Amino acid sequence: MGAGRRDLTNEEREAILREICLKSCESSLRSTIATRQRSVEFMPEPMVMNDMLNYVHLDEKWFYLSKATRTFYLVPGEREPERKCKSKRFITKVMFLSAVARPRYIHDTGLWWDGKIGTWPFVESVTAQRASVNRPADTYETKPITVTKDVYREFIVDKVLPAIAAKWPKIDRTVLLQHDNARAHVTPNDAKLRFELDTYNHRGWNISLAPQPPNSPDLNILDLGFFAAI
């Protein structure tokens, strides 16, 4: 330290830091206010948030028959549960399609609707071609199937739409089916799906397909919290 200079006291250091922080906050606040003002000026008209009460969220998810590691709490004398598998690579996994909507209160009935449309596995029943130590030949087995556009369309038509017709609140029959832009998903221009949707629309429904906007993971309610909760 040079001659004639003294160390700052703790009070002086705190005062300097407080001044720096206040100036930084004021600058950031002015920048934020200016940015919001420019955004408001850019918008041609006031924007209204969509409550998304008419949306049905669709998405697929892999589920394993059992986890590789699990914790069990046993009382004295209780036997440990048995799990048999060649290795964790052989644990059966199945893809499911889930459809959920936003929960809501139905004033006509005075009840809450949970918004759960359904969850369906992509599986099929086939007969075993050969006998094994586990079962004889010609025994029916449940096998996972590959999800293609045709399979996905079939599930929409045979599973999702009938479930919506059975469970959707009757106060409003406008429904938007939202899914991401995966390769196996059908598009709004799919002729076969349009025919099925028109069939429901002739019965008083207004069902259409609304693909999820790209780069918008926050609009996928299933990935945000539903799959993690089950």
Image (tube, rainbow, N blue to C red):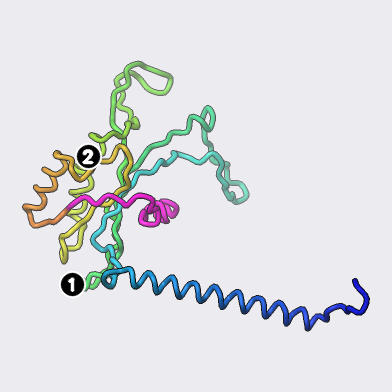
Amino acid at circle 1: Asp
Instruction: Name the quadrant containing residue 125.
Output: top left
Left or right: residue 33 compared with residue 196? right
Q: Residue visible at 19% across and 48% down? A: 161
Q: Residue visible at 93% across and 76% down? A: 3
Q: Residue 131: horizontal and vertical position, in percent? A: 37, 17
Q: Residue 203: horizontal and vertical position, in percent? A: 7, 54
CB atoms of marks 2 and 1 within 8 Å: no
In the depicted view, which residue is nearer to us: 138 or 65?
65
Label 2 to label 1, Cα distance in Å?
A: 34 Å
**Disc ID at residue 169:** none
Q: Residue furthest top?
A: 130
Amino acid at circle 2: Arg
Left or right: residue 191 compared with residue 12? left
Q: Residue 24: horizontal and vertical position, in percent? A: 60, 74
- Structural crowding at the residue carrying mark 1, measured as other residues with C-alpha within 10 Å and reported as few (<14), some (14–19) or many (≥20): few
Whether the magenta-drawn stretch holds residue 220 is answered as yes
Q: Residue visible at 15% across and 60% down? A: 173
The residues colored magenta run: 208-230
Q: In this picture, is 87 found above or below 11?
A: above
Q: Residue visible at 10% across and 53% down? A: 201
Residue that numbered label 2 is attached to: 153
- SS type, badge 2: helix
- Structural crowding at the residue carrying mark 2, measured as other residues with C-alpha within 10 Å and reported as few (<14), some (14–19) or many (≥20): many
- Say which quadrant the N terminus sits in: bottom right
**Disc ID at residue 108:** 1
